[in-house]
Image: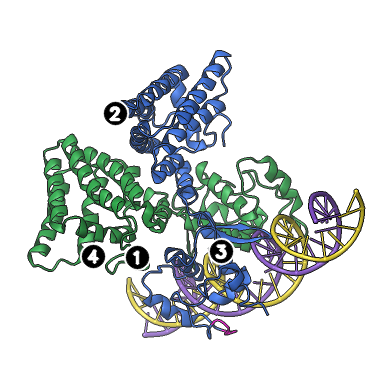
Chain colours: A blue, B green, C yellow, D purple
Amino acid sequence: MLNVAWIAPELNRSDLLSAETALPPNDLIYRPHCPYTDRVSSRTENRSSAGSSRSDHVIDIVKNLIASGELRAGDRLPVEKELAARWGVSRGSLREAVRSLAALGVLETRQGDGTYVTQLDPGSLLRPLEFWADLQQVSQSAELLAVRRVLETESAGLAAVRLTEEELARLDDVLTGIEEGMATGRLDPETFIDTDAEFHRTIAAASGNGALAALIDSLMTRTLRGRLWRAITERASVDEAHAEHRAILAALRTRDAEHARVRMAAHLLGVEVFAAAHPTDGLDPARPGPGST
Amino acid sequence: MLNVAWIAPELNRSDLLSAETALPPNDLIYRPHCPYTDRVSSRTENRSSAGSSRSDHVIDIVKNLIASGELRAGDRLPVEKELAARWGVSRGSLREAVRSLAALGVLETRQGDGTYVTQLDPGSLLRPLEFWADLQQVSQSAELLAVRRVLETESAGLAAVRLTEEELARLDDVLTGIEEGMATGRLDPETFIDTDAEFHRTIAAASGNGALAALIDSLMTRTLRGRLWRAITERASVDEAHAEHRAILAALRTRDAEHARVRMAAHLLGVEVFAAAHPTDGLDPARPGPGST
DNA sequence: ACTTCCGAATGATCAGACGATTATCGTCGC
DNA sequence: GCGACGATAATCGTCTGATCATTCGGAAGT
């Protein structure tokens, strides 16, 4: 058979995924009837897993496997049927757990191929944060913007002393692209939003702090940026926002961290103040922005 | 039948959960065979839902229902069978979607009762962030600490001018409790960690920015704090950390925002520098801290 | 009026089957 | 020899039906 044959060629790390992590003994997982009550006791005494459901249990198992290093980024998991039998749950319950972990950015399933652990980088694991940001009501937009301002101010200060010439040139290209769009008269709002995001994202990435950059990225989703479009246009004008961008870039070029911080803070504070002053203004959740999702 | 009877008594908001959100027409959901291909086209043209799977589709539906206000915090969803039929998916696929949304802190299921929308507050929706923070490897602890420092510095500044007398008294009580523990000679590490968290949490909550406070809270999980214990003790001493706490409180008392910011930043920078200098030091993931989870 | 108990409602889990997609590998032609 | 092509197996995705476990509310009893 092939019940254990896969371990060696795939993970070659002994039987790490077997029953070593607070799991029911192997002699339980083959019981055909009434496999419930036995597990309850072990669950109750295990304080680490708050979930009483089988799926939550599996989630805890996988989480612990990753935390303990037995499952590493990019690893491939055994097939669902195997895992279900190994952990004493049905394939349906296992799939619910895998689905949840996929939603959390921990696992990734590929039909016809297998289930893999993601790279576990901030970009993957912070996807749920984008979900949160998108669901934020208008009343909390100002709060979110304040957080963004704090984080991006820091990223600008860090980037000022770390940006390479290539990155500086890239930032210049981005802004030049906007200027060309404005010059032709017809600047697509969506294009501006995307370009604006690219500008901020590049600076954040240059901060050298991956967690900081990922957080900033997550707090700047398309939905959120779409909502801000009106704030930008109504507050003053696209030109003013663009001028602030230019000021930020100029500060970055001089490697003056404090200068860059002030410019970035002022830039984001403008939108923030507007959002705070117009909490119930034209931010129709059903149509968050110009054509964006 | 009871296919639509439930709507009025439960949500009394017309047929909000029916087929209005880019869903297949009702005449499709009753097709017994081959219900696949028809949906693919509508999915392909719908750019908002990137997920090609049925579960991802359901997740998008629920997300849109919440974003559009048709589903509000605390609302009860129809029974699984009803929703599955309404949205043209099997109960299994629906459950996988519900599970994922539960993992994201959006939905909450109660066996024997029903499925409900959570309060959608930052505390609920940022639970996945704690998951992320816990999984962070040691090498990224310094980055996480830097983010914490930035956020908490801001929260300290905001709290300085907003803290009530009661909250100031509470902070004092917290620190006094630590002093008593130190005086008796035996200060439980776990107690110190919890008390330290309480101190920072109280300040964050007093910032007036719920999103900021929730983020700070999420970045300060028990696992993470456990890992920091050694950094705190080895860097200097618990007494030094406590003295810094006292300095922060003193600054808050004077309502001097800048003073408070500096004190808070210095406090967190100490731990941060230590973590950065000792990236592979004694942070056994299998035993993250002194008895903590 | 209060408590107790039972049944309906609902989510949780299991089992088996089949469809859809991808990777793999052998074969064929050049 | 080597690359393109097609068959095959492996794997995830989905559906169906059933049973178990839990909760809630009303009926019955006191």
Name the subunit of mark 1: B
Q: CA distance from mark 2 to mark 4?
A: 39 Å
Q: Is residue A158 left or right of residue B256?
A: right
Disc 3: which residue: A96
Residue B35 lies, in percent from the top left, at 74, 55
**Residue B190: assigned label:** 4
Mark in the foreground, 2 or 4: 2
**Residue A258: assigned label:** 2
Q: Which residues are magenta?
A: A29-33
Q: Is residue A32 magenta?
A: yes
Q: Nearer the viewer, residue B142 or A35?
A: B142
Disc 1: which residue: B284
Name the subunit of mark 4: B
Q: Nearer the viewer, residue A140 or A125?
A: A125
* Identity, as a three-letter code, of the amino acid under mark 1: Asp
Residue D26 lies, in percent from the top left, at 48, 70
